[in-house]
Image (cartoon, helix red, strand yellow):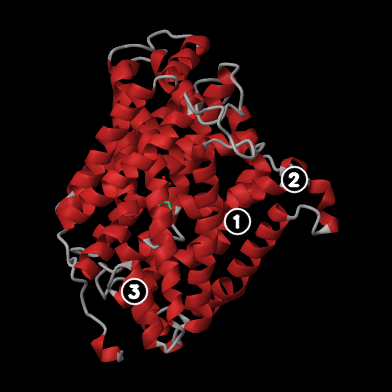
Amino acid sequence: MSKAAMAIESVHGTWRNRWTFVLAATGSAVGLGNIWKFPYIAGENGGGAFVIFYLLCIALIGIPIMVAEVVLGRHGRHSPINTMRLLAQESELHPSWVIVGWMGALAGFLILTFYSVIAGWSLDYIFKMASGTFSHATSEQAGKEFTELLANPLKLTIWHTIFMVLAVVVIARGVNKGLSKAIRILMPMLFVLLFILFGFSLSTGAFGQAWDFLFAVDFSKLKLGGMLIALGHAFFTLSLGLGAIMAYGAYMPKSASIGRTVLIVAGLDTLVAILAGLIIFSLVFANGLEAAEGPGLMFVTLPLAFGNMVMGQFLGMLFFVLVTFAAWSSAISLLEPIVAWLVESLKIRRMFASILIGALAWFIGLGTVFSFNIWSDMTIWDKTVFDMLDFLTANIMLPLGGVLIAIFAGWKMNENIIKHELKLSRFSFKLWRALVRVVAPVGVVLIFINTMWPDFFPWLFELN
Ligand code: TRP
C-alpha cells in the first residue's frame, strides 16, 4: 500500500478538535483504575516505594508508549487490527504484526467483562448513599454492607447488566454523538468533588500519615511481584497496550500536537490517582482500618467518610455517580477497538456489532460475579476467575502489547512518517525514541523475568 492511499480521515468519524480527543482519552484513562484500583494495590504493596516505582513507569514507559499509540492510530486511521495491518504493509514488514491488534482486541474484551461488574458495585452505591445507609455508620457497619453486596450474585448480576447496557448504548451511537457531551460536564465535576473530598481528608487529622504512606520511600517494602503490579497498572491506568488509545488516535485531527496532548492526558490521570490515594488513606488511618484491605477499600472507607460529613448523603451519592461516569467513559474505550474492527471488516452495522460484543462480554462477566460468592473457593494458583482475568490482562497482555507497539514504532516503522506525525524538536524526538526503543522494552522484560523466575537476578535476592 502506498503512502498516498493511507486514509486522511477514519470512516468512523473525526473528533471535532484536539480537546475532544483530550476529553475522550482522559475519559478512557481516568476510571476505576485510578479511584478504586490504585489505592488498594498501593495499600497491598506497602505504599511509598510502590508509588514511586509506579510514577517512574508512567513517566519512562507509559507516556512514550501512549505517544506511540496515538502516532500509529492517527497515521493508520482504522481500528487497531486494520491499522497494524496497513502500517506493516506500508513499511514493508511481516504481516504477523497484525497479531498486536488481535491480542489487544481480546484484552479489551476480557477487561470489559470484569470492569462492568466492578462498575456495577459503584451503581449500587449510588442508591446506598442516597438512601442514607451510611449515616453515622461505624467502620464495621460499612464493611458489612460491602460484604453483603458481594455475597449476593443476583444483585451483582443486575448491576453488571445495567452497566453493560449503558456501555453498549454509547458505542452503538458512535463516540461523537454518544458520551462526549455528558463527559464534558461530568469530568470537571469529578475533579471538583475530588477537591472537596481532599479538603475533608485534610481535616481528618490523618492526612500526614496518608502522605507518608504514599510517599515515604522504603525500598525494602517493594517486592518483585509488586513491581510487576506497578508496571501493569501504569499500562492499565493510561489505557495502554491494547489499542484503545490507538483507536481514539485514529479519530484525531491532523493538526493536533501529539506530544503535548499526551502529557495533558497522563498528567490528569496521575493527578486523579494521587488525590484518590491521599483521600482514601487519610480515612483509612483516621478510622483504624487496614491499608491492605483489598478491592473493598474504596467501598468501605469513602461511604464511612460521607456518612459522617455535612451533606454527606448528597455528596456521597454524587461521588458514586461520578465514579460510574468515569467507569462508563473507560468501558466504551475497551469496546471501541473490537467494534470498529467488526464494522470495518464484516461491514455489519455498528449497532449490531456493539450488541454482539456486549452480550458476549456480559456472559463471561458472570465468572467475575461468581468469583465473589458461589465460586469464591474455586481457585487456580490461589486466584479466582476475577483475579485470573485481572492478572492475565493487566500484568501480562497489556505490558506485552505495549512493548510490541513500542518496538514497532521505535524500530520498525518508517522513521520519516513518525517524524512527520510527531513534529517534535530534535531533542524531544531523540528522547522519545530512546525511551520506546530501549527503556520500555528492557524495563518490561526485566520485570517479567523477575516475576516468572524470582531467582534469576541473584543481586535482587533480598528484595523477595
Ligand atoms: N484506564 C481505565 C482505568 O484506569 C481502564 C481502561 C479503559 C483501559 N480502557 C482501557 C485499560 C484500555 C487498558 C486498556 O480504569
Up/down of 389 relative to 335, above or below: above
User: Which residue is tagged 2?
Assistant: 219
Q: From the Cβ of disc 3, is ligand 1 less than 8 Å away?
A: no
Side of 365 where 405 appears, left or right: right
Q: Are marks 2 and 1 in contact (CB under 8 Å)?
A: no
Residue 100 visible at all: yes
Q: Is residue 428 visible?
A: no
Q: Which kind of residue does numbered mark 1 sit on? A: Leu
- Counting every numbered tag in the picture gives 3
Residue at x-position 35% and y-position 14%: 310
Q: Nearer the viewer, residue 146 or 265?
A: 146
Q: Position of residue 207 (x, y in %)?
A: 56, 27
Mark 2 vs mark 1: which is more N-terminal? Answer: 1
The N terminus appears in which quarter of the rendering? bottom left
Lower sequence index among marks 2 and 3: 3
Q: Which residue is mark 3?
A: 83
Q: In the visual, does 41 lie left or right of 263?
A: right
Q: Residue at x 50, y 28 (%)?
A: 375
Answer above or below: position of 225 versus 135.
below
**Residue 184: x and y, percent?**
22, 47
Percent coordinates x, y for residue 212 in the rendering: 64, 34
Q: Amino acid at mark 2?
A: Phe
Res. 187 image quadrant: top left
Crowding around mark 3 (Cα neighbors within 10 Å: few <14, some 14 to 19, many 20+) is many
The residue wearing badge 1 is 56
| Amino acid type of the residue tagged 3 in the rendering | Thr
